[in-house]
Amino acid sequence: MTSPGVLRVAAAQAVSVSGDLVANVATAARMAGRATDRGARVVLLPEAFLTGYDRAAFGGPLPAADDLEGAWLDPLREVALTRRAWLLVGTPLARGPVRTLSLLLVTPDGTVTAPYDKQHLSGPDETDFFDRGDHGATLSVDGVVLGLSICYDGSFPEHARAAADAGAHAYLNPAAFFRGAEHRRDLYTAARALDNGMYAVLAGLTGRCGSGDFSGGSAVHDPEGRPLGRLGDEEGVVVADIDPAVVEATRAAHPMLADRTADLGRVLRC
């Protein structure tokens, strides 16, 4: 069996306009174009980017899961087709009576699916509007396996661990961190990489969106949690290579993943 090669990924961040689907799809396509200009095969954009992360947008009409073949996504489809790229972008979705915070996947043949719904909802801004996802997901590109998550999922070590157990070489986390949470944002991403000896990629919403102010901070961390590249709060793209050989070597040198004790037994109270 041929070993997977190096895969170039990008995390892109920009300002999203609350409730303006057309403008946000256009911005996402523009940022994906910038990322693929730098050789990225996979481009990750922030949480809820297509509607904006804002209660007003969440409570209004949402894109429908049964309309992913619609023309509204043509700008993203065009980038994926012409650049032979895989695009991942966050959006709320109406799935019949169920509403989810989801991750859209646009493949190089122009197919659009929604393979992952956020499993950990954060506070009333989310629990007031959305239902929890009921499954994890991975994406394999050229043999490199990418674990999918959305924002608050990355605060839970077991979520990234489940992706690692499923063979992930990297953990992708589109996010929307409010300004003031920069320390936690950076620590969570680095910790998920270090915990599991895999890369961690964060794409953060930035700037004003409705009533919120977001901090950006998109980054790629290596399998020991060191940043390979990071943005501030500016619009931009951070690009890095995911190398499964580095993942294998890191896990051999620091085998926390393999050495985990599944059952720690009862806790004695002294």
Image: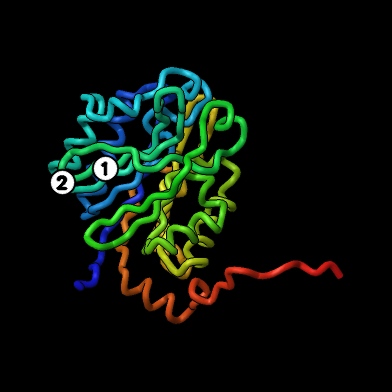
User: Most extreme residue toward the top, as rendered?
Assistant: 60
Using a 10 Å C-alpha cutoff, classify the residue at mark 2 as few (fewer than 14 neighbours), some (14 to 19) or many (20 or more).
Answer: some
Q: Do the residues labelled 1 and 2 touch (CB within 8 Å)?
A: yes
Q: Mark 2 points at which residue?
A: 83
Checking the image for residue 32, the label placed there is 1
Left of 81 or right of it: where is 63?
A: right
Image coordinates for residue 241, horizontal then vertical, percent: 30, 63
Image coordinates for residue 165, horizontal then vertical, percent: 44, 64
User: Most extreme residue toward the right, as rendered?
Assistant: 270
Question: In the figure, residue 80 lies in which quadrant?
Answer: top left
User: Most extreme residue toward the left, as rendered?
Assistant: 82
Q: Nearer the viewer, residue 185 or 100?
A: 100
Question: In the figure, residue 102 lies in which quadrant?
Answer: top left
In percent of the image, x 41 and y 18: which residue is there?
Answer: 61
Checking the image for residue 244, the label placed there is none
**Quarter the C terminus occupies:** bottom right
Identity of the amino acid at label 1? Ala
Q: Which of marks 2 and 1 precedes in the sequence?
A: 1
In percent of the image, x 53 and y 62: which residue is there?
Answer: 191
Image coordinates for residue 82, horizontal then vertical, percent: 13, 42
Q: Colour scheme in the image?
A: rainbow
Q: Is mark 1 on a helix, strand or loop?
A: helix
Say if 200 sits above or below 244 in the image. above
Say if 92 sits above or below 57 in the image. below
Say if 244 sits above or below 86 in the image. below
Q: Nearer the viewer, residue 191 or 64?
A: 64
In percent of the image, x 38 and y 78: which residue is there?
Answer: 249
Calculate the distance from the C-alpha at mark 1 to the C-alpha at mark 2.
9 Å
In percent of the image, x 39 and y 38: which residue is there?
Answer: 90
Identity of the amino acid at label 2? Arg
**Quarter the N terminus occupies:** bottom left
Say if 86 sits above or below 25 in the image. below
